[in-house]
Image: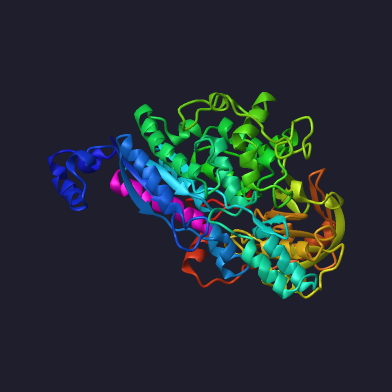
Amino acid sequence: MRSDRAKAGIERAPHRSLMLAAGYSRWEFERPWVGVVNAYNAIIPGHIHLRRIADAAKAGIYAAGGLPLEFPVIGVCDGIAMNHLGMKFSLPSRELIMDSIEVMVEAHALDALVLVTNCDKIVPGMAMAAANLNIPSIVISGGPMLAGVYKGKEIDFSSLYEAVGSCAAGKISRDELDRIEETACPTCGSCAGMFTANTMNCMMEALGLALPGNGTIPAVLSARERLAKDAGRAIMMLVEKGIKPRDILTLKAFENAIAVDMALGGSTNTTLHLPAIAYMAGIDLPLDRLDEISRKCPHLCNMSPGGPHHIQDLYAAGGVEAVMARLNEAGLINGDCITVTGRSVAENLKGAKVLNEDVIRPLSDPYHKEGGIAVLKGSLAPDGAVVKQSAVAPEMLRHQGPARVFDCEEDASAAIMSGRIKPKDVVVIRYEGPKGSPGMREMLGPTASLAGMGLDKEVALITDGRFSGASRGASIGHVSPEAASGGPIALIRDGDMISIDIPARKLDLLVSEEELKARRASWKPYMQEVKSPFLRRYRRFVASGVKGAVLLDE
């Protein structure tokens, strides 16, 4: 066992003494040491119940012959960090989580990991740690929040942000906004739509790094606790069989996850996180491969924010297993990939059935013929940009309009909320990329305000930043190269015409090469000022959004 480095032999008598001091009996610490990484905190509603999930996982580990050793990691609530300085710290926290797990595992010679997680950056951060350390690991998430109900209609976190725009436009009263505020997030768990947290929890299941059910069992159901116990038992099987993350996280497994992502209409943030996890597993996963899969994998689930269904509906319809079974029947995923069950994907899917064909459409009658995400390229985004095409109104799939340019999110939000953005405009928010911001902030505030004002079918938004999974409309992000690196987005001026053609995968700035050359000659490099030493270090080493915004060694 790896843990023998810290507990075996006469020279480790001091180490064993410390374990005795911690209350462990000799027969206990002779077991495999299983780190239980608990992302519990009292801030994130998706994490406030994780003590219960961690306790269940520890019970499973202990019953199966392991010694569970719990330790914490940080976690950022993207909803609370949204639309202010705090969002600069969200994406960088992913790398901190990965690094802190590595420190704990290597410092204490742990044999295996159970990763107790739930929300946006915590899930990929833990998966990246598993891929990097390559010791037996399993993910168990806290599960999704239930949708709220207002005036007989299901609502969620994105509904609230859109209500802010509606209130600013005079469409609803402040009293009604307050009632929506009290109703939108009714339980613990990750926000109820197919936003980033729930998308990534589904991705863990699709990758084979989590047990079936991980992506969709609601947080408040006892089945979630039982799944955590099963995860604790499963990790001991993985230890016994020597199955490690890189045995699971193959290129085929990532292609499976992308296909499932396209079928679900998941968050655009998967285009950051899946390549980042792949990078830590030693696999190159370019955006072009994601787009190739999107073109052949149909969009089967019309989930919020683009559609009416929530994760609880997907769970009742058969969950991720049912979606994967449908894709497997059509040869759209690889059934031979190994998973944390010790069995293949195809073996796991035996008996999986679609229980509601409105929630999970047949392949012959999808919501859209292509997957939920599209990768755009052109003169405005030579290296690429991403859009959740499944959440774009049909009339905005092709759009041409004048640029309204802002060098930070705050200025754009102020213009939107004050009514200065007009139909046909293309809002451009730049210097919000990984380096420019730094931290690549999410733009849920601006996109939701536009939707709440009824402008999502008339106005596009383009940024080198990113979007919340709760964003909808013609919201095109991750524009690369980013403005801070001198990408064409840095050269746009108010009034320039921008052409968007999502079906053709094109994003172009309609300005002559001669004019752009002249602008570049006078362009001065610019990045948003930051006081944080941590963010300054992050800016120095972070890669482009199209490369997953990973930190490079040099």
348 horizontally vs 477: left or right: left
Residue 78, x across and y down, in percent:
57, 60
Question: Residue 519: horizontal and vertical position, in percent?
Answer: 77, 65
Kindly identify the residue that appears in the image at 12 percent across and 40 percent down: 10
What kind of secondary structure does the magenta stretch mostly adopt?
Answer: helix
Q: Residue at x 82, y 63 (%)?
A: 454
Farthest residue to the left: give it. Answer: 10
Give how far across and how far down residue 61 sits, in percent: 35, 39
The reply to whether the magenta stretch includes residue 366 is no
Residue 542 image offset from top left, x and y in percent: 54, 55
Left or right of 67? Residue 176 is: right
On screen, residue 510 versus residue 374, left or right, reads right
Q: To which quarter of the image does residue 323 belong?
A: top right
The N terminus, quarter of image: top left
Q: Is residue 303 visible?
A: yes
Please tell me whether residue 101 belongs to the stretch shown in magenta.
yes
Q: How many numbered marks, from 0 up?
A: 0
Quadrant of the rendered structure where residue 329 is?
A: top right
Residue ranking furthest to the front? 152
Asked whether 136 or 215 is in front, the reply is: 215
Color style of the picture: rainbow
Quadrant for residue 3, please give it: top left
What residue is rendered at 46% in x and 33% in y?
Answer: 340
Q: Which residues are magenta?
A: 92-109
Residue 286 seen anywhere in this rendered image of the structure: no
